[in-house]
Image (tube, rainbow, N blue to C red):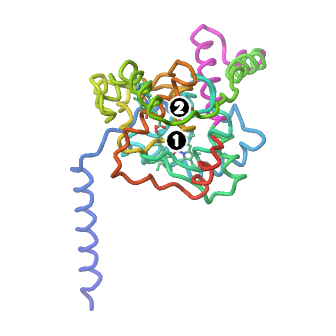
Amino acid sequence: MAHGPTILGVLILSAASALTLAASTADTPADPPSSSAVRPGLTLEQYPPHGDAVRGREVYAQNCIGCHGPEGQGDGPAARWLNPIPRNFQQANFKFRSTPSGELPLLADVVHVVTCGLAGSSMPAFPLMAEGDRKAVAAWVLHLAEYGMLRGEVDYRLDDGDALEKILGDDWQEILDETLGDAYEDVWPVEVPQEPENDADSVAHGAELYRAQCVACHGAGGRGDGPSSYALRDWKDAEVVPRDFTTGVFRAGSTPRDLFMRMKTGLNGTPMPQISGSDDDLWALVHFIVSLQDPDTKEAPHPLSCAAHAKDAAR
Ligand code: HEC
Ligand code: HEC
């Protein structure tokens, strides 16, 4: 019996060193770039949340921090393993919106992403989270985006030689009004018009537009393998791959309405542009890319609430 603990101890020790060895030799991806290092400037404490965002901060700490990081810079402990990497909310670049290109999303857009997740990425769906909590966490996400923009403005003024006391004192109200006023000025929902019939003419028209405008990135067969596809980078210089239309899996919903909205508004911060053209042109493109789906693929599983959502064509 006297040997029991010793043997156990050795076993635990060797298991631990084996683990250490495994960890040190494993192909660990590099730490994502983090700008949360201490430096003078606006801190998150100096821009406290109000309203729903106060509760949202707690919901965020419980559900989102592991990927999106303590201050929403996309640098949580799990981030290095993920591709695409989690969004840095402070950059205020949101891909999946119902607002014009380059603008912030509506609160409802963020709630939708939280509720339904982003298919084909590691962004989970939270359909069982109370609706109030989903709204609150979305408000916190927008607060982080506001903070990022304000921090940028503060940094700019510091570089210009202004004192931090003056910036956060006398100038602060003006900075708030201007920065946030500008940011929300054009945040309104883009209308999606009635979908015309998806017939052979529309698909043929879409194919023609597709050859001219999309092939370079999305490829002739829609597999995301066009000649330009290999060199694409997003605004953080991370690799980004055009969507493969044959899989039928789209990040932010695969209803015709969702696809129309993605083209009409573009994916901020990525090479996927806002597509110009008449409503009929955009619908024709939707009809064509839907026709590229491999008939053997199965529909991407959706949380129940999102399937209902899709049916209502609410987005
Ligand atoms: C397991 C990791 C993970 C967790 C947990 C996670 N996310 Fe994400 N999230 C991601 C990834 C990865 C992306 C980027 C996907 C992409 O670029 O297509 C993302 C993107 C987003 C976006 C960007 C939408 C846009 O339009 O660009 C929002 C908003 C978001 N997440 C909110 C949240 C919130 C709120 C929570 C917690 C309730 C959360 N996420 C939890 C991984 C995660
Ligand atoms: C310069 C390259 C480029 C061009 C041109 C381009 N795309 Fe994209 N597209 C992308 C990239 C990259 C993504 C994926 C971005 C991401 O996930 O961050 C994408 C994504 C998409 C999505 C996916 C939305 C989702 O929810 O998953 C659709 C739909 C789409 N493109 C349609 C088109 C159509 C139609 C055209 C032509 C009218 C077009 N794209 C032209 C690069 C491009």
Q: Which span is picked out in magenta?
A: 142-170
The residue carrying mark 2 has its beta carbon less than 8 Å from ligand 2 = yes
Who's the residue at 78% across and 19% down the image? 173
Observer-nearest residue: 313 or 148? 313
Q: In which quarter of the image is the N terminus?
A: bottom left
Q: Is residue 145 magenta?
A: yes
Observer-nearest residue: 239 or 76? 239
Relative to residue 255, is residue 46 drawn left or right? right
The percent coordinates of residue 273 (x first, y second) are 47, 22
The residue carrying mark 1 has its beta carbon less than 8 Å from ligand 2 = yes
Disc tally is 2
Main SS, magenta residues = helix
Who's the residue at 68% across and 38% down the image? 107
**Dot 1: within a 10 Å radius of its alpha carbon, few (fewer than 14), some, or many (20 or more) residues?**
many
Q: Which residue is label 1 attached to?
A: 252
Q: Which amino acid does label 1 sit on?
A: Ala
Q: Is residue 1 magenta?
A: no
Who's the residue at 36% across and 46% down the image? 81
Who's the residue at 45% across and 42% down the image? 250
